[in-house]
Image: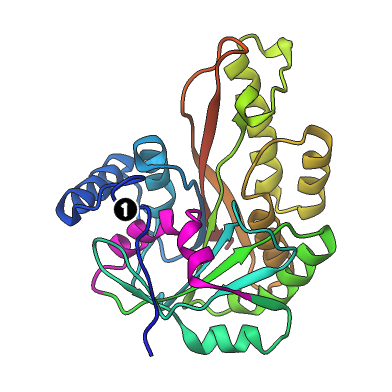
Amino acid sequence: METIRRASHAGSWYTDNPQKLAEELDGWIRAAGLPKSSDVRGVIAPHAGYSYSGRAAAYAFGNIDPTNITRVFLLGPSHHYYTTKCALSTATVYQTPIGDLPIDLEVIEELKATGKFESMNIRVDETEHSMEMHLPYLSKVFEGYPVKIVPILVGALSAENEAMYGKLLAKYIDDPHNFFSVSSDFCHWGSRFNYMHYDKKYGAIHKSIEALDKMGMDIIETGDADAFKQYLLEYDNTICGRHPISVFLHMLRNSSTKIKIKFLRYEQSSQCKTTRDSSVSYASAAAKVDA
């Protein structure tokens, strides 16, 4: 029986007009002007509304060569549903305005059999936006290619569980037909986010935010999950996809394929100058086989 996860944020977070959406995505990918590489095996990309982060996300998705990839694992944080585990989708297909993405039920069953995952119902699935915001890009990039997806909602994991899921999923990295789409925004700054870290030595507030984000991005690029954990403990930077990123770092550490993460784009929704301002940061990275 088919269970459809509707594109619940289409028409609000991004356009539900298929032609307009396809044109927007094509335009952003063209503007990023990146060469497609079969060595790119994963991305870290933002998940805000496309008017905010659509352009930045192209610097992640524009790297993908779809030729050999048949399966995409999605790792997204949970914004509304609290769990200390990872949860699997109960849908059989994810809709987007520009084409549907079937779920790889075989891999879902395989993961379920480990006993480490819970299932999220369709309501939880449709309320969450973190993975949905990657879907139109994936649908566009894999147009004409038979790709299946494995959506994994990553809960508020302990450091031990991040490592456990990383080990468990690491084997999938060693199959070059698999791809990984990791969803995260970076610093959410301002009183409405309850986060106002400001180091005056950088001058303007937005420069301090950028320095803080870049520090985190540099650590992610080293692939050191423990150093990333330390950074988060020290600065508490409001990186909403901290758990998916950490799981991904543990996966890379435990796989036999050497893969290196490199950030290609950094943007802020606006430039904070006073404590009345607020902004969200967006960073895009490609995870590439390190020859």
Farthest front residue in view: 123
Q: Position of residue 249 (x, y in %)?
A: 69, 59
Q: Is residue 132 above or below residue 70?
A: above
Amino acid carrying mark 1 in the image: Ala
For residue 131, say whether it is visible: no
Q: Position of residue 266 (x, y in %)?
A: 50, 34
> Does the magenta portion include 133?
yes
For residue 53, say whether it is visible: yes
Q: Is residue 16 left or right of residue 206?
A: left
Q: Is residue 12 left or right of residue 211?
A: left
Residue tagged 1 = 10
Number of numbered labels in the structure image: 1
Q: Which residue is found at the position 62% from the left and 15% from the top?
A: 205
Farthest left residue in view: 19
Q: Which residue is found at the position 36% from the left and 39% from the top?
A: 55
Dominant secondary structure of the residues highlighted in magenta in the image? helix
Q: Position of residue 24 (x, y in %)?
A: 23, 45
Label 1 packing within 10 angstroms: few (<14), some (14-19), many (20+): some
Q: Is residue 286 above or below residue 275?
A: below
Quarter in which the C terminus is drawn: bottom right
Q: Position of residue 233 (x, y in %)?
A: 83, 40
Which of the 4 image quadrants contains residue 140? bottom left
Q: Which residue is found at the position 72% from the left and 57% from the top?
A: 156
> Does the magenta portion include 41?
no
Q: Which residue is found at the position 76% from the left and 46% from the top?
A: 228
Bounds of the magenta span? 119-144
Quarter in which the N terminus is drawn: bottom left
